[in-house]
Image (cartoon, rainbow, N blue to C red):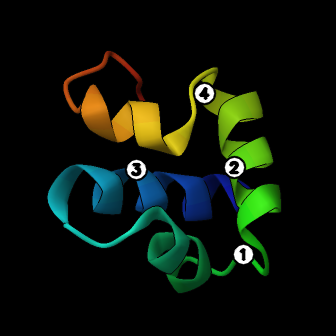
């Protein structure tokens, strides 16, 4: 379930203008710090840096 949420978050980070906090709650996380921690732990990059590097080689 977490992997699905993170994959959805990646899609939203790439293809929307929503704020990271909006995406966090939209995909089902209950808090921004936890979302950032899990995202960074999984992908090795923060959601904000991921968005800035939209064409990063991260695969879901």
Q: Quadrant of residue 40?
A: top right
Residue at x 20% of width, y 67% of height: 17
**Secondary structure type for disc 2:** helix
C-alpha gap between disc 3 and disc 4: 10 Å
- Please name which of the two marks, 1 or 2, marks the residue nearer to the observer: 2
Q: Are marks 3 and 4 in contact (CB under 8 Å)?
A: yes
Q: Nearer the viewer, residue 55 or 47?
A: 47
**Secondary structure type for disc 3:** helix
Q: Mark 1 vs mark 2: which is more N-terminal?
A: 1
Residue denoted by label 1: 29
**Secondary structure type for disc 1:** loop
**Secondary structure type for disc 4:** helix
- Please name which of the two marks, 3 or 2, marks the residue nearer to the observer: 2
Residue 38 in the image, given as x and y percentages of width and height: 77, 46
Residue denoted by label 3: 10
C-alpha gap between disc 4 and disc 1: 16 Å
Residue denoted by label 2: 36
Q: Mark 3 vs mark 4: which is more N-terminal?
A: 3
Q: Quadrant of residue 25?
A: bottom right
- Please name which of the two marks, 4 or 2, marks the residue nearer to the observer: 2
Q: Is residue 45 left or right of residue 36?
A: left
**Count of marks placed on residues:** 4
Q: Nearer the viewer, residue 44 or 18?
A: 18
C-alpha gap between disc 3 and disc 1: 14 Å
Residue denoted by label 4: 43
């Amino acid at each position: 379930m977490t992997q699905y949420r993170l994959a959805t978050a990646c899609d939203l980070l790439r293809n929307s203008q929503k704020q990271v906090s909006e995406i966090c709650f939209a995909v089902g996380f209950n808090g921004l710090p936890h979302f950032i921690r899990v995202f960074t732990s999984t992908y090795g990059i923060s959601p904000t840096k991921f968005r800035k590097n939209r064409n990063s080689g991260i695969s879901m």
